[in-house]
Image (cartoon, helix red, strand yellow):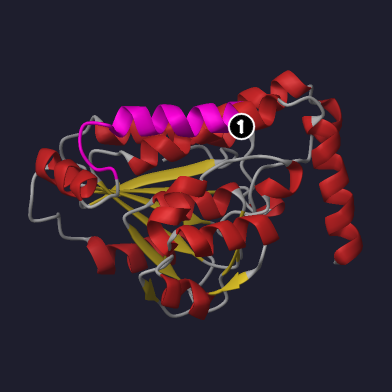
Amino acid sequence: MQPSESPLHVRTLNGVACLSLSRVDRGNALSAELVDALLQAMQEACADPAVHTLAFLGAGKHFCTGFDLSDLATQTEGDLLLRFVRVEALLDAVWRAPVRTVALASGRTWGAGADLFAACDLRLLTPDTSFRFPGAGFGLVLGTRRLAERVGADHARAWVSDARTIDAPTALARGLAHAPIDPLPLEHEAREAAVLERCGDAPAVDRVTLAALRLAGRSGGGPGGDALADADLAALVRSAARPGLKDRIIAYRERSTRLK
């Protein structure tokens, strides 16, 4: 278990590594420290042969409100570029994990949080969950191909370009989410129990077969997985490296504040 001040609470139960985002005061927004902690926890869990499932949870009301902009004033364009690259590395690691991946969303599941949800194999949500993909609003291309795998290219393009708010029924109808669950208490233990109820048993196939089945079920499936990952990273870097990224984020945040 991580120290109480850690941005990530980690516990392994019956082969399920529960990774609970624990920045409740920031809506579990993805700080640089939280992204690093997630990548480290994933690496350690996947190195454990007893782990068959990675589960992503959010402490408090919201699963994840996206990229943390609380320190935007002190960030350079280079800082922001590196942080977005690290987020893409996290999403790709989830997308290609050698074990089953599960996300349980509630409340705001926005931006990079929505991308994290979409990258998982099994996607559960509570009735109050809402999704938004606002990155294109400040010129960023992140997670769009993976989202299109879930909901189709037309819906993905519309959701991203319009930064629409997607409610739980729409997410279920379009395939972004698999199944609803009842509203849950805010404690880690209650959410971990809900995940264990759904996926406490190991998959019926081994890791190698699971990875092969996952790849075969995706468009472009086959040995080109690395090329697709490289293309995702290149698209992100090109969009983030365009001069004025910080100004675009500031302008987007100001527009969003006026619309609230």
Is 248 on the left-hand or right-hand side of 211?
right
Task: Mark 1: give few (<14), some (14-19) or many (20+) Cα within 10 Å.
Answer: many
Give the total number of marks visible in the rendering: 1
- Looking at the image, residue 86 lies above or below residue 256: above
Image spot of residue 112 (x, y percent)? 58, 47
Position of 83 relative to 204 (above/below): above
Magenta stretch encompasses residue 232:
yes
- Identified at 54% across, 35% down, the residue is 87
- Residue type for callout 1: Phe
**Which residue is labeled 1 in the image?**
84
Identity of the residue drawn at 16% across and 48% down: 213
User: Image check: 203 left or right of 126?
Assistant: left
Depth order, front residue of 178/18: 178
**Residue 136 is inside the magenta segment:** no
- Which quadrant of the figure has residue 203? bottom left
Residue furthest top in the image: 78
Task: Check disc 1 and report its element: helix, strand or loop.
Answer: helix
Most prominent secondary structure in the magenta stretch? helix
**Residue 178, how many percent across, how many down?**
35, 70
Against 11, residue 45 (above or below) is: above
Q: Relative to 210, does residue 176 appear above or below in the rendering?
A: below
Looking at the image, which is closer to me, 9 or 218?
Answer: 218
Identify the residue at horizontal 86%, vertical 41% (top origin). Answer: 250
Quadrant where the C terminus is found in the figure: bottom right
Boundaries of the magenta span: 220-237
Residue 206 horizontal/vertical position (percent) = 9, 44
